[in-house]
Image (cartoon, rainbow, N blue to C red):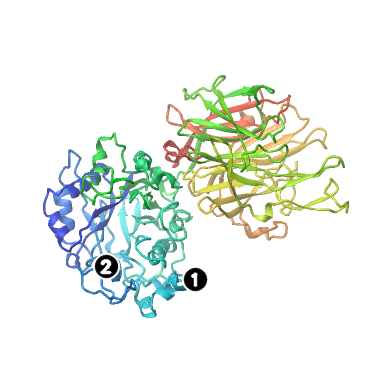
Amino acid sequence: MVRFAQFNASLNRNTAGQMQADMATRSHAQIAAVAEVIQRLDPDVLLINEFDFEAAELDAAFLPTNVPSLNFRRNYLNVSQNGAGTVDYPFVYAAPSNTGIASGFDLNNNGQTVVIPGTPGYGDDALGFGNFPGHFGMLLLSKFPIDTVNVRTFQTFLWKDMPGNLLTNDPTAGANNLRNFYTPAEQNILRLSSKSHWDVPLITPDGVVHVLVSHPTPPVFDGPEDRNGKRNHDEIRFWADYVSGRGDYIYDDRGRRGGLPTNARFVIMGDQNADPFDGNSFDNAIQQLLDNPRVNNTIAPSSPGGVQQVDDGGINPNHRGNPAFDTADFGDTAPGNLRADYVLPSRDIAIRNAGVFWPLRTDPLFRLVGERGSATVPQNPPGGANNPTSDHSAVFVDVDLAVRNPDIGVRRLTFLGQNTFPPGINIFESRLGGLSGLAYDAPRNRFYALSDDRSQFAPARFYTTVANLGSATTFGPGSIGFTGVTTLRDGQGATYPLNSIDFEGIAMATANTVWVSSEGEVFLSSNPEVPSRVTPPFIAEYNLETGREIRRLPVPRKFTPVVEDTNNSGRLDAGDTLRSGVRNNLAFESLTLTPDRRFLLTATENALAQDGPAATVGNGSSSRILKYDVVTGQPIAEFLYEVEPVAQAPVPPTAFNTSGLVELLALDNGGSLLLALERSFSAGVPGTGNSIKLYEVRLDGATDIAGIDSLLTADRTRIQPAQKRLLLDFDTLRLPTGLDNVEAMAIGPVLPDGRLSLIFASDDNFSATQFTQFLTFAVELGGLATNFRFNGGFGSLGI
């Protein structure tokens, strides 16, 4: 196991030479506290951001000489701090930084060009903000040899030379466009990196790993032109292009061109100054890395302390991001606690563990972090009373370099047992049944089981459900209980009228809200006395306590059912034709949120009318998976999912039969690894007629078909569908009760033996011949488990 760590340690000072003086002692409290954090984590590879250098301290090969890096190692890391084990790094790398280098231009447009270090305003006019050359530099420490001959640095790469850059291609209108803010002469000298970008190859026993380090400028400390936000965006984009085969335009400081070979392994490290949900980033800058198919983002480093520090108050309780993933405690009135620091391995490196050094207040090591201020108590500078080290916490990721292809996905499923409930029973005066969606609320340790009752037997609702999983080996009668029922209401607080909704999927949204999907309806009546009903599907957010609708997400027009009056009756009836959109009862049956709450996914149960036929005994159906960015609330992608044919021929052959995608469950933060539940039913066959199968689904490499309105007219040879692998055919369980209409699933609490629980529930269709069924499994997830083990947040999978 190899530990990579990133720490913005605030080892910077306002004047040149001061860090030298502080490092020369062994008694500086802040430096000692930083060293203790490092000793406690003992990383094999460590990037320190904000480590001051002076130009004279770098030799011709850009290797640091004796001060201050040597003194930091000799006087602090090699000396036990409060009993922590010492740590040694025989291999060190540093290089010049753009911070504090005079530009000779008035880069902040205040009417003054400042060129003397230390003079007020000098930092703003420098090529990168800094009071002197080397201010806020970087230091890389390694236990593995550095391939110094093949190190690449990109300090002098010009911003304007990035195709589509935000300097000369800024989409902002008016005076705040950077082409208007910076003069042509300034545009010609502006460097992309506020510090630098380094590609440092490390020689490990398992091959070369490229450590890609940087420290983009904060997207603040500017004006309405947002020059720092746009620079931050493109600094992050640099690595996204470099690792993805889009780096032909890149040149390094020695003139070598191109990006990283596509088969090279890498770890991107640095304080990126960009949160995926909150803060001031331009155009969701960090998603350029988190969504990059070359990046392994399956596990987000987390901490219990980040969750606890929400009580700093200010803006923190209103943040959209999961506080478990926060890495920095900034001003709590704005921008608050954020995820700013990242360690991101390449997709072909297996992650085994990850974390943020942010202990709880009750932890003895909390003294190394401190309160770092609150909305009412200002934060002290690093080394101050409430800020012993830095406003950032160290972030680490443990990887197995010996495994070339990461073991990401489902390793094993073990059936634990079932609970069944007979038809026709009441729960809190509401008819139990129609359980079509299931979501786990980890902080409250309970589930929400959504009924698909169209307000026929009782108003539309979900049940609060508890599961007794005290044993890791058995799950039987009495393990499931119901503790409440919540009525779902529209935006005005009224219950939904009969047949106006068809709720099918549910997922946790925040601590106090849930997402719910409705299939809509395409009911074309054959009875003139009964009106037809055609309504579009929708996804809405609801308050957990009141059940009231808060907002709806936009659904692309292609999903809206369009019926043509083909019999010219002047009204919609059974003689008319569905031309496009969702089919009746074959729409948004599924709903899932990624563990970090960034992406929401749903899918049609079968093909849209314009995409192909519904599933039959001989043929499958082309469903669409629809992916949303929760931050923007907008749909961002669609993928083709091929549903299996109906499993058995009905008896007689004209009897009802169906097969469809009924549930999804996101396993990774990118929303590219899913569980998919398919249910087939055939009337008249022996047993219950249900056939249930669970698949592992990968969207990596799948074609985004959002721009294709009709798959029937598309070139299918150019469309790569989602890849799926059968995990379980439920028929192999050979349950004495048989299988009911299983439609819901959710990851539940951690079992006593450390495995995760996976629970399924059935929709009995409120039929006297069916039953409500809960099936519980233990699931082992390779490379993913820590996504679901941390119970301090609010994700649909227990984060």
Residue 193 screen position, x and y as percent: 34, 66
Image quarter where the C terminus lies is top left
Q: Which mark is residue 173?
A: 1
State the separation of the CA atoms marked 2 and 1. 28 Å
In the rendered image of this protein, does residue 752 appear above or below residue 389?
A: above
- The amino acid at mark 1 is Ala
In the rendered image of this protein, does residue 629 appear above or below residue 188?
A: above
Residue 433 screen position, x and y as percent: 66, 28
Number of numbered discs visible in the structure rendering: 2
Q: Secondary structure at mark 2?
A: helix
Residue 102 screen position, x and y as percent: 26, 73
Q: Secondary structure at mark 1?
A: loop
Q: Which mark is residue 697?
A: none
Q: Quadrant of residue 650?
A: top right
Residue of label 2: 123
Image-based side of 236 in relation to 474, left or right: left
- Front residue of 791 and 658: 791
Q: Quadrant of residue 151?
A: bottom left
The residue lying at 74 percent from left, 36 percent from top is 648
- The amino acid at mark 2 is Gly
In the rendered image of this protein, does residue 17 appear above or below residue 8?
A: below
Image-based side of 154 in relation to 601, left or right: left
Residue found at the far bottom of this picture: 185
Residue found at the far top of this picture: 477
- Nearer-N-terminus badge (2/1): 2
Image-based side of 763 in relation to 563, left or right: left
Q: Tell me if residue 24 can be seen.
A: yes
Residue 244 screen position, x and y as percent: 46, 61
